[in-house]
Amino acid sequence: EFKVLESKLSNGEITVKEFIEGLGCSSLYLKEFYAPYPNTKVIELGTKHFLGRAPSDQTESRKYNQILATQGIRAFIRAMLNTPEYLQAFG
């Protein structure tokens, strides 16, 4: 499933950030880290996977819960990858 993403990354067709987003939106990630869990656990796992830390506080958890509940997992992942924190930490 990841061969296409890996190929695009190595050929310079996508950025590392787009590669990470592709991994997060993959059917394997959705099956393992989204489908079995309630939103609160998805938010905890997602911030750990994509930002390298647990949710910082209830305000952040509520913000991401709102995105997850209204726009879905892909929007949740994009929201984390588009933060200044992600850019500063991972470029």
Image (cartoon, rainbow, N blue to C red):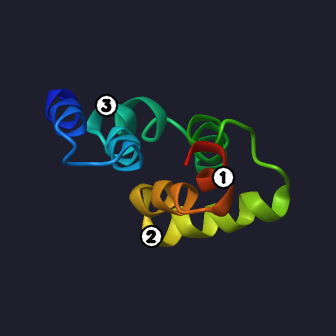
Q: How many marks?
A: 3
Q: 89 and 33: which one is in front? A: 89
Q: Quadrant of residue 50?
A: top right
Q: Report helix, strand or loop for mark 2.
A: helix
Instruction: Locate residue 84, reporting x and y percent.
Output: 65, 62
What type is the residue that disc 2 sits on? Gln
Query: In this image, 74 relative to 77: left or right?
Result: left
Instruction: Locate residue 4, reporting x and y percent.
Output: 14, 34
The residue at the point 26 percent across, 48 percent down is: 14
Instruction: Locate residue 71, reporting x and y percent.
Output: 44, 70
Instruction: Locate residue 41, reporting x and y percent.
Output: 64, 40
Question: Label 1 neighbourhood size at 10 Å, few (<14), some (14-19), many (20+)?
Answer: few
Question: Label 3 neighbourhood size at 10 Å, few (<14), some (14-19), many (20+)?
Answer: few
Tell me, for residue 28, which label it has, or none.
3
The residue at the point 16 percent across, 27 percent down is: 3
Q: Whole-Å distance between the Cαs marked 3 and 2?
A: 20 Å
Q: Whole-Å distance between the Cαs marked 1 and 2?
A: 25 Å
Query: In this image, 46 relative to 30: left or right?
Result: right
Q: Quadrant of residue 42?
A: top right
Q: Quadrant of residue 45?
A: top right
The residue at the point 25 percent across, 37 percent down is: 9
What type is the residue that disc 1 sits on? Gln
What type is the residue that disc 3 sits on? Leu
The residue that mark 1 highlights is: 88
Asked if residue 11 is positioned above or below residue 74 in the image, the reply reads above
Q: Whole-Å distance between the Cαs marked 1 and 3?
A: 28 Å
The residue that mark 2 highlights is: 71
The residue at the point 22 percent across, 30 percent down is: 6
